[in-house]
Every structure is written in structure tokens, then in C-alpha cells.
Amino acid sequence: MSETESKNFIETIIEKDLAEGVYDTVHTRFPPEPNGYLHIGHAKSILLNYGLAQKYHGKFNMRFDDTNPTKEDIEFVESIKEDIQWLGADWEDRLFFASDYFGQMYEAAVKLIRKGKAYVSDLTAEQIKEYRGSLTQPGREDPSSGRSVEENLRLFQEMKDGKYGDGEKVLRARIDMASPNINMRDPVIYRVAHMSHHNTGDQWCIYPMYDFAHPIEDAIEGITHSICTLEFEDHRPLYDWVVRELEYPHPPKQIEFAKLYLKNVVTGKRYIKKLVQEGIVDGWDDPRLVSIAALRRRGFTPESIKMFVEMCGVSKANSIADYAALEYCIREDLKAKAPRYMAVLDPVKLIIDNYPEGQTQMLTMPNNPENEALGSRQTPFGRELYIEREDFMEEPPKKYFRLFPGNEVRLMGAYLVTCTGCVKDAQGRVSEVHCTYDPASEGGSSPDGRKVKGTIHWVAAASAVKAQVRLYENIIDEEKGVYNEDGSLNLNPHSLTVKDNCMLEPAFAGAGAYDRFQFVRQGFFSVDPRDSTAELPVFNRIVSLKSSFVLPKES
Ligand code: ATP
Ligand code: MG
């Protein structure tokens, strides 16, 4: 980020802290719970935390917040690491697991008990809720709150030793049952749960609650600015209380910012998980999703995601971003980087009747007219070509400048051709388009200055590479919004279109997983890393090009 760019509010806080000596360094972290794949919203948090550490020459930690054994899975640990590395956030040698601190958390709880700041409660979860009161009513004292330090120490030890069943006893912080902030009404900080943990196995049968564990994790790691999302704002007094009562020498500071949401896009981990579990999508990396794995598989670049989250900015106010902005970013990133080759997605033969049979001519084409550094290639041209079916119309509407009988168009980089007619199959479907070419127009230039409005792309039939192309739309029907009244998702039945018979120019041969291209006149595409084979390459459409003229869709 350049010096002239305005600072976001977190940078302002950090710079003030550094100037006033509150901290002499910046240390951030990204603390995902390994209970699902990361999504575009997490990317914002990752790049924000990593970016701040970089900007202020500080450090960035990767920490799995794996204190809840019920929902966590090792599969997610691996996917999360892969996603963060791919985004370019480097935690160096600082990869941590909150579960590695269970011992220290236990000691911290004992310390609170010794200080008279925590007690073991016999209330059930339901009773605790009832005693807690509401926004308008203060809470009531827990009948167990009067226990002596010795008794609390003994009972907590017994909880740890497995003497009690799940829910039979909890440890509560002693703060203030009359606090206007419900989070401060003697929150539960440890619970009994006889469950195996993916990291610690059966070593523990008591587990710390998030609000207690998180500040301890931050403090242990020397985090200075603990950045989280807005829903934790009301929890900040508890965060500060934990850090203060445990007397950490360098207390971390919690700062909240607004989550990133995309309009009409399923972003939440919970909802993505549902789509995966119900088999509506083909796994967490289905290219229609906005999990990071899905964006990567679809062909998005880390640079485009970075550009997008920076465009969205960092603020305290909730706002909703447009998916179109993400599309803008990937187009910007790829327009000069990706080679532009010709691919025909819905092929029909074009036969040039006056071109010599059996002749092949190699034409030199720039690989990207906007970037000379990508050089040029030789593309074969011949009597039989494939063109897009929609580039021919027997009876064209007004302003249709492509092929129709009697009209002349430019075959991109090749010749001017004049349409002479078409041949239809038994069903009345066009099976061949015929034309003649002007040999004097090599390269596609007009020999006598005559105007030719339309330019279409093509692929020589003899050397075409057959491929499958997958076109994606939003998985949600945008007209109807994300949810139905009953809470179910409004699915778009056309979110995936598979084109099995696409014809590509030979320059595509040998393209490997994640290779990205612009298909001339179509959009940006990338090789699917999972399903593409040498026999049948598979391309995902990352994003289409903006098109000025769209034909009504064939149904
Ligand atoms: P979800 O809301 O999708 O279930 P989560 O908040 O439960 O996600 P965590 O693994 O707890 O997921 O999140 C890790 C970090 O990512 C947290 O600091 C969280 O605040 C941040 N984060 C999660 N979702 C977003 C989002 N949409 N925008 C920005 N940051 C997010
Ligand atoms: Mg969460």
C-alpha cells in the first residue's frame, strides 16, 4: 500500500499504539476453527492480519482454534493450511494449535479460582440460562457461588479427573451477575465433555469455552492486536477481564471489524457445509462456491482475491459486496497475463468452398494483443473450420454483423469470408455453413478498404483439440434472493452447464492444471485440476467477458 493511500481504522489504532509505546511491535494472527473450509470472508481476515504484520514489520501467526472437540476435523486442518499458503500469507515457523495450550488454560483457571474469581457450579445449562436474566432483567446469583477456594480447587480437579458426567458441573468466572452486558454475568469458562479431541485424544475431559480460551491463546503467543469480527464486540469486556485477571505482562488488544458478505452468494461456512453434505455441489471445492478451495479450482488467482478484499476496505460498518466486483478483479488480473487463444464452445462447421482442399496454412497470431511479452504463435488454418453456432444466422435480426447469407465477416487474424449459405440435417438444424474467402485479405485486413463489421473466431477442424468446458452461474437464483421463506436455499437450476464437444486450437495442447487462458470473445478459463485428462481436457469458466450483444438463450 502506498503512503498516500488513506489508512483504515485499524492502521490508525496500530500507529497510535506504536507512537505511544503501548506496543513496540505488531503481532497478529489468523485463528480459524477447523470445522470447515475457508471462504472468501476468511480471505479478508487472513490478508488483513498478514498485511498488517507485513506493513509494520511485525509477525503473523497461524493458529488453529481447536478448543471445541465436537465439530473439528483433521481434513479441515490440512485444507486451511493449503488455502492460507496459496493466498500467500506466510506464518513462517509459527503454526500453533490452541489445544497445545490446554495445560496452560487449566492452570489459568486454577489461578482464577485461587484469586476467588472463578467457582464450580452445579447448575444445569438450562438453569444457568434461566439465572442469567435478560437484557431487561439482572441475573441471579448462582447458589454455588459461595463455595470456598479450597472446595472449588478440589471440585475443578475432580472435573478434570473425570469424576463428573457431561453437563454435571461447570466452572464459571465470578464477574457480575448484574452487569448490563450479559457476557459478563459469570460466564461459563470450562465444561465437562467426555470426548476425544483430534489433537489431544482422551487426555482431557474438560474443555475451555471460547471466550476464556481465546484471550489466553493471544496472550501466550504475544499477540498485540487481536482482530476479529463485529459479533465479538460485546465480548470484548470479557476478553479484557480474562487478560487482566490472569495478569499477562503484555495484554493483547481486541479490535473488531465488519465481516465481508457477498450479495446473493452463499458465504457462511455453515451454509456451504449444508450444500456439500446434501450433495447439491461436488464437494467443498465445487467451482460454484466461494470457498477458497473452490475459487482456486475455478481459476481465480490469489492476486485477484487480494485486489478484491482491498477494494472492499476495512470498516466497522456491515456492508455487502457485489460478486461482480470479484469478477472485475480477476479480469483485471488476467487480461494481460493470460494468453488469448481461440476456442469454440458450441461448434458448427464452416467450409470455405474456394480454399484448396487438403491445404494447411500457418498464421502468426499474437498471444495477447495487450501484452507483447507473451509473444506469438502459429495457428493452423484450412478449408474446414469450426465456428460458434451463434455466429451464423440464416435470418439475422437487425444489428447482427456476423455470418448470414451474403454477409462478409473477418475470420480473426485470417481472411475475410462471405457467407454463401448453409446445409441442414434431417432435423432442420444447421450442420454446415458455407462461404468463400478473399485470398487478398490475408491477416484479416480489407484489401480495398471495404467495411467489414463483424469479426469472429474459429478453429481449424483438422487439428482441433476436443475439450469439455464447464460454465458456471450463481448457485442461487438471484432474482428470488438467497433464502426461501422456510429457510431453504433458492437454487438456480442452471448453475452448471457442461459443454462436451468444444473445439480448441492446438496451442491449448499440453495445458496443465490451473493454467489460465482467455478464450477469445468468451471469457477467462482455467484447466480443472481434478477432472482434466490428456484425452479430454476440462476447462472451468472463471468469468465471462462483458459482451455488448447477447443473443436470447437457446433452450
Ligand atoms: P462462518 O461465519 O463462515 O461460520 P466463522 O467466523 O465461524 O465463519 P472461524 O473459523 O471462527 O469462522 O473464523 C476465523 C476468522 O475469520 C475469525 O477471526 C473470523 O472473525 C474471520 N471471519 C469469518 N468470516 C468472515 C467474514 N465473512 N469476513 C471477514 N472475516 C471473517
Ligand atoms: Mg466460528
Image (cartoon, grey):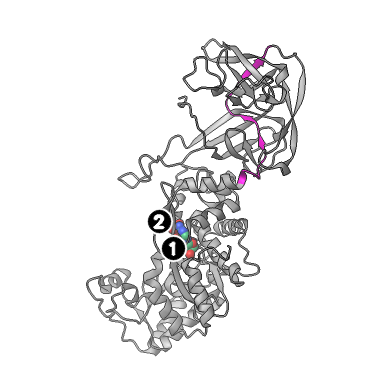
Residue 241 on image: x %, y % = 41, 80
| Quadrant assignment, res 157 | bottom left
Q: Is residue 320 left or right of residue 500?
A: left
Residue 143 on image: x %, y % = 28, 81
350 is within the stretch colored magenta: yes
Q: Is residue 493 left or right of residue 347?
A: left
- Relative to residue 32, is residue 183 depicted above or below? below
Q: How many marks?
A: 2
Visible residue check, residue 141: yes
Residue beneath label 1, please? 315
Residue furthest front in the image: 449
Residue beneath label 2, please? 319
Q: Which amino acid, mark 1? A: Ser
At 56% from the left and 11% from the top, the residue drawn is: 424
Q: Residues within 10 Å of mark 1 (few under 14, many from 20)?
A: some
Visible residue check, residue 70: no
Residue 296 on image: x %, y % = 58, 49
Q: Which amino acid, mark 2? A: Ser
Question: CB atoms at circles 2 and 1 under 8 Å apart?
Answer: yes
- Screen quadrant of the C terminus: top left
Of residues 312 and 77, the one nearer the viewer is: 312
Of residues 124 and 468, the one nearer the viewer is: 468
Q: Is residue 382 left or right of residue 56?
A: right
Range of residues picked out in magenta: 334-353
Q: Residues within 10 Å of mark 2 (few under 14, many from 20)?
A: few
Whole-angstrom CA distance, mark 2 to mark 1, is 9 Å
- Screen quadrant of the N terminus: bottom right
At 58% from the left and 77% from the top, the residue drawn is: 25
